[in-house]
């Protein structure tokens, strides 16, 4: 049986988005019916939660940090109602409001039935993977971030799963991916890597992606740039943004994005492989995401096609979606 996984990028539910959620804590506040329908059609939904979820905490004590993101507690239920199965907390905002807010985030997500990877009460918990199941297929999800080091979990100290990917993939991380591969039918690694506001992955990101695949991952889906990148065989270098209240770069157009749907299938149901990618063009308005149309959609199509061409990947179109066939 084929398994379709929806992959969404940076989902920032703080600041202006948090205010909208306090007024109306519903999935429809954040996403149009068409976007919600695309998510509902997937068997599993995984995204990067670019904030903590809590009513407590104080700013992380870093005088150079410019942005702090915290969603209200009801955001966890909104994610569950949206159909989100798993989030990664391995990013540069999980500890924006300190250790208590991170603990609340993990507790609230668990209570809402949303799995979380990439952060925890100590380094062992932060580095643990989650196994999701749909249609008899088990998908292991591994979350990791390459910034900031200050947020890294340590022995008996909460934090995120951190690795300095600029110097290569550490042994504990390749071993984690290999262990996940032995525990599930397929492994998704979802790293928060590389700098913000770039249009293509840096060399160390490309190298790390290959190491993840060699270690046993069937799919790599990254984020951090706030702009979608091209895809190579089994690697989605950056998913871009999914919902936020960010200022818009007029050149990089971080207000135009993609929701990625990857279908896993194959002759052996116990070891599915990615066979098809569909990308749904999105327009990120202030605190609300809808389908892109007209010139917005054309811009996304042209940008994604050219970005994929850099990796030798051909992009097609089917039923209003951009497609890549891997089978």
Image: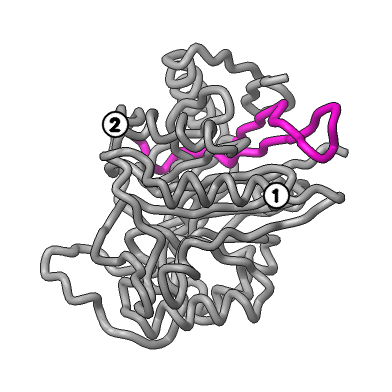
Task: Tell me the quadrant of the picture where the N terminus can be found.
Answer: top right
Q: Is residue 235 magenta?
A: no
Residue 142 visible at all = yes
Vertical comparison of 170 with 161: above or below: above
Residue carrying label 1: 139
Residue carrying label 2: 251
Residue 285 visible at all = no
Q: Which residue is drawn at 51% across and 23% down?
A: 232
Q: Which of marks 1 and 2 is in front?
A: 1
Vertical comparison of 185 with 86: above or below: above
Residue 192 image point, x, y percent? 40, 49
Q: Which residue is drawn at 69% across and 30% down?
A: 274
- Per the rendered image, the range of residues in magenta is 252-280
Mark pair 1, 2: CA separation = 37 Å
Residue 62 image point, x, y percent? 16, 70
Vertical comparison of 5 with 288: above or below: above
SS at mark 1 in the image: strand
Q: Residue at x 77, y 55 (%)?
A: 133
Image-based side of 322 in relation to 41, left or right: left
Q: Between disc 1 and disc 2, whose residue precedes?
A: 1
Q: Considering the whole magenta stretch, tell me its main secondary structure.
A: strand
Q: Does the magenta stretch include residue 255?
A: yes
Of residue 153 and residue 12, the one placed in the foreground of this image is 153
Circle 2 crowding by C-alpha within 10 Å: few under 14, some 14–19, many from 20: few
SS at mark 2 in the image: loop
- Name the mark on residue 275: none
Circle 1 crowding by C-alpha within 10 Å: few under 14, some 14–19, many from 20: many
Image-based side of 297 in relation to 303, left or right: right
Of residue 258 and residue 180, the one placed in the foreground of this image is 180
């Amino acid at each position: 049986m084929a398994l379709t996984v929806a992959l969404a990028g940076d989902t920032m539910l703080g600041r202006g988005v948090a205010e909208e959620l306090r007024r109306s804590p519903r999935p429809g506040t954040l996403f149009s019916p068409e976007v919600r329908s695309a998510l509902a059609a997937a068997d599993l939904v995984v995204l990067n939660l670019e904030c903590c979820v809590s009513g407590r905490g104080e700013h992380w004590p870093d005088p150079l940090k410019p942005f702090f993101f915290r969603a209200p507690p009801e955001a966890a239920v909104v994610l569950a109602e949206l159909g989100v199965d798993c989030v990664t907390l391995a990013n540069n905002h999980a500890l924006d409001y300190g250790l208590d807010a991170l603990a609340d985030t993990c507790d609230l997500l668990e209570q809402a039935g949303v799995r979380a990877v990439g952060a925890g009460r100590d380094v062992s918990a932060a580095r643990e993977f989650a196994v999701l199941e749909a249609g008899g297929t088990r998908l292991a999800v591994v979350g990791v971030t390459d910034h900031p080091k200050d947020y890294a979990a340590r022995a008996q100290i909460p934090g995120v799963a951190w690795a300095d990917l600029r110097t290569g993939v550490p042994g504990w991380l390749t071993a984690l991916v290999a262990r996940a591969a032995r525990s599930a039918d397929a492994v998704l690694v979802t790293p928060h890597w590389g700098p913000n506001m770039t249009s293509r992955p840096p060399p160390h990101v490309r190298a790390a992606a290959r190491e993840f695949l060699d270690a046993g991952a069937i799919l790599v889906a990254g984020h951090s740039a706030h702009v979608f990148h091209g895809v190579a065989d089994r690697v989605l270098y950056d998913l871009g943004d999914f919902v936020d209240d960010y200022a818009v770069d007029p050149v990089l157009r971080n207000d135009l994005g993609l929701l990625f749907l990857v279908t896993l299938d194959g002759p052996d149901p116990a070891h599915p492989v990615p066979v098809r990618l569909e990308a749904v063009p999105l327009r990120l308005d202030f605190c609300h995401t809808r389908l892109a149309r007209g010139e917005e959609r054309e811009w996304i199509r042209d940008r994604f096609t050219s970005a994929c061409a850099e990796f030798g990947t051909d992009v097609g179109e089917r039923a209003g979606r951009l497609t890549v066939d891997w089978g």
